Amino acid sequence: MQKEIEYCSCCGGKLTGRYERVSKGLALSLLKFREQILSQSELAGKLVNKVHLSKDLKLSKNEYNNFQKLRYHGLIAHYKNKETKEYETGYWLLTSRGNLFCKNELAVPKKLLIFRNKIEERSEEKITLENVLKNDDIPVWYKREDFREDFSVPFENVNDYEEDTDDNQLSMF
């Protein structure tokens, strides 16, 4: 039975959180995202870890609307220009955690309790990409050996792009 949602009597805001998981759809979106980064990087001859979701990536409406949920697990982050120190609207980057998750080298909590854009609770149970995707769901290009290779330049650490990193909490912009 689902818990009843409570609302604040003063402002009408929700007083309960929601659980977020890395679903099959989110995992496939993350793989598409990494594939785009690798394609851009191959053309440039160096790592280009900056993708505009609507211009550079062909995502369905559902994929586009839910893509930002990957940030709760620290797999993606808003792109911040290193010179101006400002976030560039619509641009995202793959974090080192996201890169490791795509290569099935990192397990993330199965679910996170999110309340007002903050992580309140992490489940003890962990999952990997292969736990989320069945073998039939894994794209053909993911199985290529070069997809698992990296460029010599490391992916950015999520902490380089988050403002609130105390107590291992990710800032939700």
Image (spheres, helix red, strand yellow):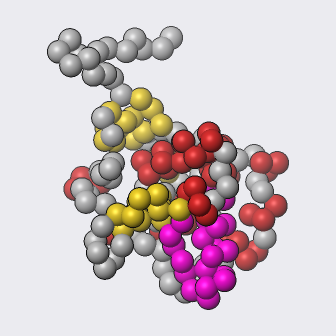
Residue 35 lies in the magenta stretch: yes
Q: Is residue 2 above or below residue 75?
A: above
Q: Is residue 160 above or below residue 89?
A: below
Where residue 55 appears, as percent x and y from the top left, is 59, 60
In terms of secondary structure, what is the magenta stretch mainly?
helix
Viewer-side residue, 16 vs 135: 16
Please state if 153 lies on the left or on the right of 173 as rendered.
right
The magenta-colored residue range is 30-51
Q: Which quarter of the picture shows residue 162?
A: bottom left
Where residue 140 appears, as percent x and y from the top left, is 82, 61
Q: Which quarter of the picture shows residue 83?
A: bottom left
Q: Is residue 77 above or below residue 123?
A: below
Q: Is residue 129 visible?
A: no
Viewer-side residue, 144 vs 71: 71
Q: Is residue 15 above or below residue 143?
A: above
Question: For the view shown, which residue lies furthest in the left direction?
Answer: 10
Where residue 131 appears, as percent x and y from the top left, is 65, 47
